[in-house]
């Protein structure tokens, strides 16, 4: 995994770790983050889970490992800092295809934006 994505995920997780003093770190840092997405101008939001392995999943039982969740696709960090590529392979998903996104808002609550099929997609990254 590229260093930039590890840093991005780590910063997203760090906020939760700092504000939650009662839960042990092993329960907080589960090698994943929740991605919330929407099309620009739409109030309706959707989510999927991004894993440090590079996998993307959607749905599944809360707290279940990546292998037991429905696969959505993959993601990878690109060579430019704050740029990522999401490859959504689930054919019936609205984001089906390849989506390149760039970070437009800094940590601790990163926002990424990209375009797919002429529509602007906005993604927000949260600790899962």
Image (cartoon, helix red, strand yellow):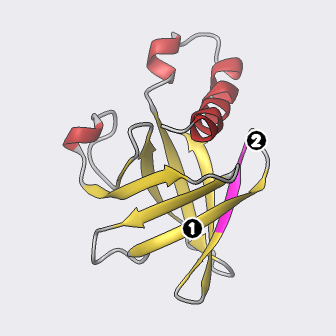
Report the magenta stretch's main SS: strand
Residue 78 pos. (x, y %): 58, 54
Which residue has dot 2 on it? 107
Between the residue at mark 2 and the residue at mark 1, the CA separation in whole angstroms equals 19 Å
Q: Is residue 92 above or below residue 54?
A: below
Q: Quadrant of residue 95?
A: bottom left
Horizontal side, residue 58 vs residue 119: left or right: left
Residue 29 pos. (x, y %): 50, 23
Which residue has dot 1 on it? 100
Residue 5 pos. (x, y %): 58, 41
Q: What residue is drawn where x is 70% and y is 21%?
A: 19
Badge 1: residue crowd in 10 Å (few <14, some 14–19, many ≥20)? some
Q: What residue is drawn where x is 60% and y is 34%?
A: 3
Which badge, 2 or 1, comes first in the chain's sequence? 1
Name the residue nearer the viewer: 103 or 78.
78
Residue 83 pos. (x, y %): 64, 56
Name the residue nearer the viewer: 81 or 44.
81
**Kind of element beneath mark 2:** loop
Q: Is residue 123 above or below residue 79?
A: below
Badge 2: residue crowd in 10 Å (few <14, some 14–19, many ≥20)? some
| Residue situated furthest front in the rendering | 79
* Residue interval drawn in magenta: 109-113
Whether the residues at callouts 2 and 1 have beta carbons within 8 Å, the answer is no
Q: Is residue 5 above or below residue 30?
A: below
Horizontal side, residue 74 vs residue 46: left or right: left
Q: What residue is drawn where x is 53% and y is 13%?
A: 23
Q: What residue is drawn where x is 51% and y is 70%?
A: 99
Name the residue nearer the viewer: 54 or 45.
54
Point out the frontmost of discs 2 and 1.
1
Asked if residue 119 lies in the magenta stretch, the reply is no
Asked if residue 110 lies in the magenta stretch, the reply is yes
């Amino acid at each position: 995994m590229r260093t930039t994505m590890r840093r991005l995920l780590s910063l997203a997780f760090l906020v939760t770790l700092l504000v939650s003093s009662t839960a042990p770190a092993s329960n907080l840092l589960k090698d994943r983050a929740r991605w919330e997405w929407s099309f620009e101008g739409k109030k309706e939001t959707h989510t999927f889970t991004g894993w440090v392995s590079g996998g993307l999943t959607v749905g599944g039982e809360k707290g279940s490992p990546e292998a037991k969740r429905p696969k959505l696709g993959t993601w990878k960090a690109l060579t430019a800092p704050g740029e990522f590529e999401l490859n959504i392979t689930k054919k019936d998903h609205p984001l089906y295809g390849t989506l390149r996104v760039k970070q437009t808002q800094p940590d601790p609550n990163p926002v990424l934006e990209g375009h797919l099929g002429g529509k602007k997609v906005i993604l927000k990254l949260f600790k899962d």
